[in-house]
Amino acid sequence: MAVIELTQEVFENTISGSDFVIVDFWAPWCGPCRSFAPTYESVSDDHPNIVFAKVNTEDEQDIAMHFQIRSIPTLMIFREKVIIFSQAGALPESGFRDLIEKASGLDMAEVHRQIVEESGSV
């Protein structure tokens, strides 16, 4: 699957309509962002069941502010509409692949149960 650009208009539908989304927050002037882009693209080719998306923080400042993006690149992983990972900094390819493997292996029923428990709702 090709990497998609997320804008304010499609962000919510993309997150809500997909079980597994990885978002790369970046900017054109950011050297580490440009260095990480080929790795991001390459890894995306190996995971057709995952939505790989990018948010240009220059063009989509409202999204960046909403998620309090202070450093770029920042990777954020959503599974079943839940942010399960958020970290600034480019990863080496092997680290990125390991991260995806760990995120894939999460028991989302347990994650949702913990969210309900922590929120105090039933």
Image: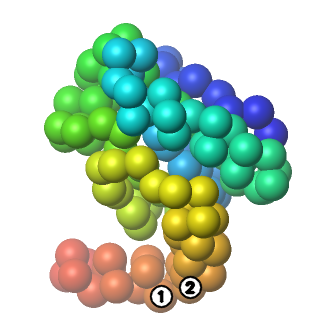
Is 2 on the left or on the right of 40, as rendered? right
Is 99 on the left or on the right of 122, as rendered? right
Expressed as whole percent of the image width and height from the top left, the position of residue 63 reads: 32, 28
Amino acid at dot 1: Glu
Mark 1, secondary structure of its residue? helix
Q: Residue at x 34, y 57 (%)?
A: 86
Question: Which residue lies under the disc numbered 2?
Answer: 107
Structural crowding at the residue carrying mark 2, measured as other residues with C-alpha within 10 Å and reported as few (<14), some (14–19) or many (≥20): few
Q: Quadrant of the N terminus?
A: top right
Q: Tell me, yes or no, if residue 25 can be seen here.
A: no
Expressed as whole percent of the image width and height from the top left, the position of residue 99 reads: 53, 69
Question: Which residue lies under the disc numbered 1?
Answer: 110
Mark 2 in CB contact with mark 1 (< 8 angstroms): yes
In the picture as drawn, the residue positioned furthest to the top comes out as 59
Q: Residue at x 58, y 50 (%)?
A: 21
Answer above or below: position of 38 versus 29. below
Structural crowding at the residue carrying mark 1, measured as other residues with C-alpha within 10 Å and reported as few (<14), some (14–19) or many (≥20): few
Q: Nearer the viewer, residue 41 or 62?
A: 41
